[in-house]
Each structure stands twice: as structure tokens, then as C-alpha cells.
Image (spheres, coloured by chain):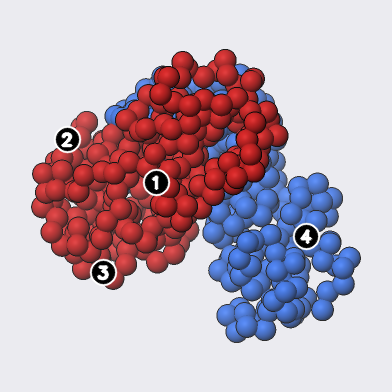
Chain colours: A blue, B red
Amino acid sequence: MLSKPQIRAITSLQQKKFRREHGLFIVEGVKSVKEFLHSDYSVQRIYHTAQTAAKLPKIPQNIKSVEIDEPTLARISALKSPQGVLAVVRIPAYPPLTAATLQQGFHLVLDDIQDPGNLGTIIRTADWFGLERVICSVGSVDAYNPKTVQASMGSLARMQVCYTDLADLVVRSPVPVFGAVLDGRALYDTDFGQHGLVVLGNEGNGIGPAVLPHITQRVTIPRVGNAESLNVAISAALFCAELARQKAQP
Amino acid sequence: MLSKPQIRAITSLQQKKFRREHGLFIVEGVKSVKEFLHSDYSVQRIYHTAQTAAKLPKIPQNIKSVEIDEPTLARISALKSPQGVLAVVRIPAYPPLTAATLQQGFHLVLDDIQDPGNLGTIIRTADWFGLERVICSVGSVDAYNPKTVQASMGSLARMQVCYTDLADLVVRSPVPVFGAVLDGRALYDTDFGQHGLVVLGNEGNGIGPAVLPHITQRVTIPRVGNAESLNVAISAALFCAELARQKAQP
């Protein structure tokens, strides 16, 4: 089974500090582990119960696979209801965002998003709508947070999530910078063209003062009812859907 | 201050069983408490810290308002970071859903939705897009769950959420029954007309077998990328937005 120090080493990856120190994060559940095994990510180790073994694909020989009992899995799991399998995966290093990269289609840009579930849902949605990449401010929640990984439902295995200085990014952007604000042009009247950055702000405060002046196209989701605002993952989805719709029906 | 039995009575409302027994639920945070005070809901009691008192509107004389210290508020709060004010509010009884009611615009119908945060986000989104009502199957998560109330960001104060037998509802529906499925007509090619039910299914299993045969219009959110599915709150939002868009640009 696993020693106490081994268990501590795995559970430490629930904290960003230790994820960054070791360059590792955890992925749980059969579906998500499968997606990471079939991706460009480097899966380091897999811990699974006897019961879950049959549900897993053949694990390549270079990946250490360890069978553990359910109580031990519960101890290393970040979930309330552990799902029988946990993988330790290497955090990738992505190449810098060049002008050429930014000119390929659309990128979602998140300015200090804080909720790990929101980020995971946004990654899943961006994957559904075929966006190029999710770009986060350095103050945003970590994409390798277990709650984010969980909410992404495997999409993190496919969708690049980069962290960068957003003020610098938007200033030098070679493509239009669309921003979700409350007093812009209606989403459906906005011509998104062929490429661009789509900036969404923090849950409570919206787009911050370092980024806001560099928004070239202020865009608003038209409101019909009474809520003051929309959840940021919902706003992101409505932008993604409109990009996809305009591409399909120009 | 508050006695131990008083504290227990309030924290018991974090559980559905006791909410139903007492017909009460809790609302936290200045913004949400304000929205409930200005709504048709009957606010019974308000507990607040000295610091938060100034941020609250004038509280009507028939509502008991109690100043408590921060540690006591932390004990009665369901939040990780208590927000200085907690209201105990009566659960309303809504009139039955008649054919005439269902013929007024669009209703979101949720078949066994389980995540309280998803339901709260859907209520907030339905409020933004001016839907008439949210109708849940009896097996759905409780709208008065503290996490749902929180995620609704005050919209629960305005948006009616009803629980009913969905099979019965869709069988006798006087309006078209649109359903979110993976193999239907594209969302943007669907003519929603003037009224209808829009059914969304459970997070893992979609629309259940009791309801699915009675969907008169199967609708799909077109996928461009690779994710297998969308979060149910995201799907709900994309339907709500499309209803609003078609109404604005018929």
C-alpha cells in the first residue's frame, strides 16, 4: 500500500504551492484519467482500486500503476465521493503566445477569475465550442486546482490554459480585443470577424483597470429580465456560442 | 446573543428535512437579504453584525432584527466566509401550474438536476433572460439549499421555482415541449414561437425516460470542438439566450 509520506506527497498536490514546486497535479475519475492518458500530457502514476481496474484502458508500461484499497484511495482523493482512480500528471510548459498564435481563431481571456469550478466549466465550454486556447491573468485561480480539473470533465486534457500578464497581452494584441461589459454593443450585433481575444472579468468586479482601456470592442449580453449580472462561466459560454454561430451562419 | 438551541434551530435549516418541517430557509449576504426584503417573500428574522448594520436597508418593524457578534454569525452561517447578515425566510407556496400559466411565455423545466450550484446559476440566468418560471422534478435538488440560494445571487427572490411531477406536466402540456438532447435539431434552426417548456436533464444522464417520449421538439446545441457534453447550467443559458434573441430579432 502507500506509506504516510507517500500519501502526504499526493495530497499536497491539492495545494497550488506544492503543485508548482513538484510540477505535478492530480486527475480523478475513470473518464478524466482516460482523457489524460490519450492526450499530450505526461501521466506519471496511476492509483486505482481493484474494482476500477477493469474500467481503465491498458496502461502503458512507462506509467507506474499501483492498486490500492478504497480507504487509501479515499485518503489521497480530493473528492467527497472518490471515483476509484487517481492519476498524478505533469503540468505542461506551453510555448509563449506569439502574434501568429493569437491570429489563429479566438482565445478566451480571463481577468482574475477566482472560482475553480467556474474556470473548469469555462474550459469544458471552450472545448465544446472549439476555441483555440484559454488565457488567464496570473492572478486567476490555478487550472490544476482539483476542483477545476473536475469541473472541466476531461476537457483540460485537450484545451491549453496559459497564464500571462494580461495588460501586456492586450496592449500588443494583433487581433481585436472584445470585452464583456455591461454597457457595450449587443452581443448579437457584434461582428466578431475571423479572430480575436474575448476578455471576461473577475466574478465580482468585472474586467480590471489594467485591461479595460485596451478593450477595442465593448460587448454586452442583452438583458431581458431583472438579474444584475450573469455568472462568468455563463457569460463566457454565451460569447463562445455566438462565435460558433457567426462562423456557421456568417 | 443566541442560545445553543437557537443556533441549532438556524443551522438545522441547512438540511432540507428541517427546511420542509419548519417551512423556512436562510439567505445570507447584504445584496441577497436586500433582494428578499424587497420581494414578495416573508422575511421572518434577520441576524447581523454591528459592522453590517449600516449596509442594510431600514428593516420593517414586523421583522425581528437581532445584532450578534461575528463568532456567533460564523456559527449560524452556511458559508465558508460569512457575510455579516443572515435572514430566516418563509418558503412560499405557489399556486398550481395551470394551462393558462404555462401558456405565458417560456418555462425552464429541470429533470432531476442534482447540483445546488447549477440550480442557483440557472435561476440567476432565467431571471436575467426574463423567463417566466423554473419548474423542477420532485427529485431535483432543493431551491432553498443554501448553496442554491447563494449561487442565485438574489434572483431566487424574483424567480418562481416550482416542484411538480414532470411526466404529468409534459403529458398535459398545452404548449410545445422543447428538450435539450444530443441528436436533435440545431438550437439556432429551431423556431421557439411564443411559448413553450424547455426541458433540461440530469447532469449525468440527461432527460429521464418518463419525460423523454413527451418531448415534442428535440433540440441540440451545435458542437464545434471535442467536449462530450456541456454543463447543464451552460446548456440552460444557451437556450434562454436563444429564446431572448429570437424574441428580439424574430
Q: Position of residue A215 (x, y in %)?
A: 52, 22
Q: Chain of mark 4?
A: A
Q: Chain of mark 2?
A: B
Q: Closer to us: mark 3 or mark 1? A: 1
Q: Position of residue A127 (x, y in %)?
A: 50, 52
Amino acid carrying label 2: it is Pro
Q: Which mark is residue B23?
A: 1
Residue nearer the viewer, B183 or A120: A120
Whichever of callouts 1 and 2 sits on the residue coming sooner in the sequence is 1
Q: Which residue is mark 2?
A: B250
Quadrant that contains the N terminus of chain B? top right
State which quadrant residue A170 falls in. top right
**Marks 2, 3 in one chain:** yes
Q: Which mark is residue B210?
A: 3
Q: Closer to us: mark 1 or mark 4? A: 1
Q: Closer to us: mark 1 or mark 2? A: 1
Q: Secondary structure at mark 2?
A: loop
Whichever of callouts 3 and 1 sits on the residue coming sooner in the sequence is 1
A194 on left or right of A161 = left
Residue nearer the viewer, B10 or B166: B10
Mark 1 to mark 2: distance in Å? 43 Å
Against B232, residue B79 (above or below) is above
Q: Which residue is mark 4?
A: A11
Residue at x 60% of width, y 45% of height = B5
Q: Closer to us: mark 4 or mark 2? A: 4
